[in-house]
Amino acid sequence: MNLAAFAMSFVLNYQDGPENEGNWLNGMSSLFPRYESLMTPANTTFILTKVILILEGVFAVVQLLPKYRGNHLVQECVKHWYFVLAFTQLLWSLDLNIENMWGSVVSTLFMGVMFATVSMILVSQAKSSDSATQTPEEYWLLRFPFNVHCGFIMANFIASINAMFVQIGFGALTQFISGFISLAIFVLAGYKFLFMNGPRANYAIPTVLAFYAVSRNKIKEFFSI
């Protein structure tokens, strides 16, 4: 099931970026130029889809090996959630071709489901992991890929909400307030994972959020109106 999930993710994301524009199947970066908002990220964020694809490709192979296939981080934590995540992205990709208000609303709902599923993996792995006995290999091979993916999906979910406001036709002031609140959520999430994450800080998610927030394509345009 995890191998099938990676296969779906690979088809959707291996050409993710400007070169994928106009294709029937869309990667995450297809959201950015479709409905631009104050939370539209710089083009450099496209590289995150490739990083996630590599990390989860390693996971998909490693979790088949005898040493890891019975590991509780795979069997009891990832379970079917990775497959649900990939299948939801497939539905999201198809829905993104519907360029109207309802398509944008449904797209945001699918993004919320993706965030919920990858969060289920993270929470389950965190609860069942003992920092005293967990090996570095278990963290980097079985947990780290989903940490990076969670940060990216969280950022895209927030960006998708802002894009939905643009599609619905909310005014500039509402879009500005929404963008400000979104960046505040980034800061609060980063603080939580760095300083309120139990005995060990989570550096992966704040790093992804910081990278995502480095450049906003639309802020300069907004203030030049």
Image: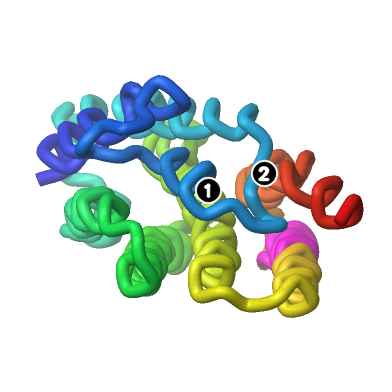
Residue 70 in view here? yes
Q: Is residue 45 above or below residue 81?
A: above
Q: Residues within 10 Å of mark 2 (few under 14, many from 20)?
A: many
Could you say whether the residue bearing mark 2 is in a helix, strand or loop? Answer: helix
- Counting from the top left corner in percent of width and height, residue 114 is at 35, 61
Residues at discs 2 and 1 in contact (Cβ within 8 Å): yes
Could you say which is closer to the camera, residue 216 or residue 152? Answer: 216
- Counting from the top left corner in percent of width and height, residue 184 is at 79, 69
* Quadrant in which residue 122 is drawn: bottom left
Number of on-image labels: 2
Say the numbered circle drawn on residue 152: 1
Q: Earlier in the sequence, mark 2 or mark 1?
A: 1
Q: Is residue 119 magenta?
A: no
Say the numbered circle drawn on residue 212: 2
* Quadrant in which residue 59 is drawn: top left
Q: Main secondary structure of the magenta part?
A: helix
Q: Is residue 172 above or below residue 75?
A: below
Left or right of residue 127: residue 217: right
Residue drawn at (35%, 38%), measured in percent from left and top? 27
Q: Residues within 10 Å of mark 1 (few under 14, many from 20)?
A: many
Magenta segment boundaries in residue numbering:
185-197
Left or right of residue 171: residue 68: left
- Counting from the top left corner in percent of width and height, residue 99 is at 34, 58
Which amino acid does the dot numbered 2 rest on? Tyr
